[in-house]
Image (spheres, rainbow, N blue to C red):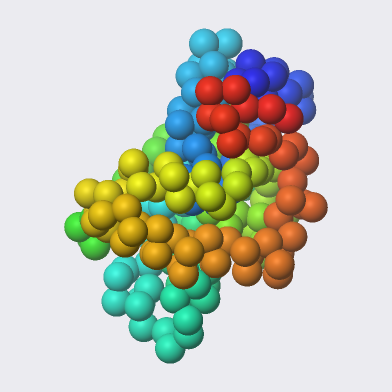
Amino acid sequence: MIKKISDEIIKRSENTDVFVVGLSGPDASGKTQMSKKIVKELQNKGVNVICIPSDWFHHPKAYRRASNGEPHEQFLYNTINFDRLIQEVLEPVKNKADTIKFTHFNVDTDEGEEEVRELECPLILLIEGIFLFQPKLIDYFDFKIYLNVDPKETIKRAIDRDACRFGEADEVTERYESKYNKGQALHRELHKPLDLADWIIDNNNWKNPRK
């Protein structure tokens, strides 16, 4: 599947200076691992590609928890600073800037550090993260890939991945059911990301993803 995705990106980006790929999906759907594999495959083919995770654009913890809304609503609306992603990365890249300068926010330390990337065309920019396919962002993406994973599978993976952050299995399960998966359900209801995606990848079996 990685080769198929990479070949499709190369085909679609032919004769373009800048081509932006969005890789989105629910939490624990495999976005980070798949994006790394795509980048490696493209680089092996001699393609100039950079990957920017939307996780680097988290709002500070105080902002994420400031709303009076339900936890899943806070998660959808207050987690990622998409305006900053647009201003610091997507707009400059689309305008073929020589460099991008952005604040790489570390969600664990709740601090940001300035990062500068030099750009050279032709360029593939891969943005990976949650909630990408929504009105304010959708027109920036030339190719949109959605990893579709059953909520029960995301919880199973999260128990293995997030135990060190959130505690025992029942605590992880409660957090995902009340916040993360519920927030993703609200995103699907409001923004229809699967309808907006060019490719939908079934990643329930991360060893054998299927289109």
| 173 over 12 or under it: above or below | below
Which of the 4 image quarters holds residue 149? Answer: top right
- Of the pair 4 and 138, the residue shown nearer to us: 4
Instruction: Report whether residue 54 is seen.
Output: yes
- Of the pair 130 and 175, the residue shown nearer to us: 175
Give the quadrant of the N terminus. top right
Give the quadrant of the C terminus. top right
| 54 over 206 or under it: above or below | below
Relative side of 78 to 208, left or right: left
| 9 over 184 or under it: above or below | above
Extreme residue in the top direction: 45
| Residue at x 79%, y 52% (from the top left corner) | 195
Q: Position of residue 31 (x, y in %)?
A: 51, 39
Q: Position of residue 89 (x, y in %)?
A: 50, 50
| Residue at x 45%, y 31% (from the top left corner) | 33
Instruction: Report whether residue 101 is seen.
Output: no
Q: Position of residue 115 (x, y in %)?
A: 32, 46
- Of the pair 2 and 95, the residue shown nearer to us: 2
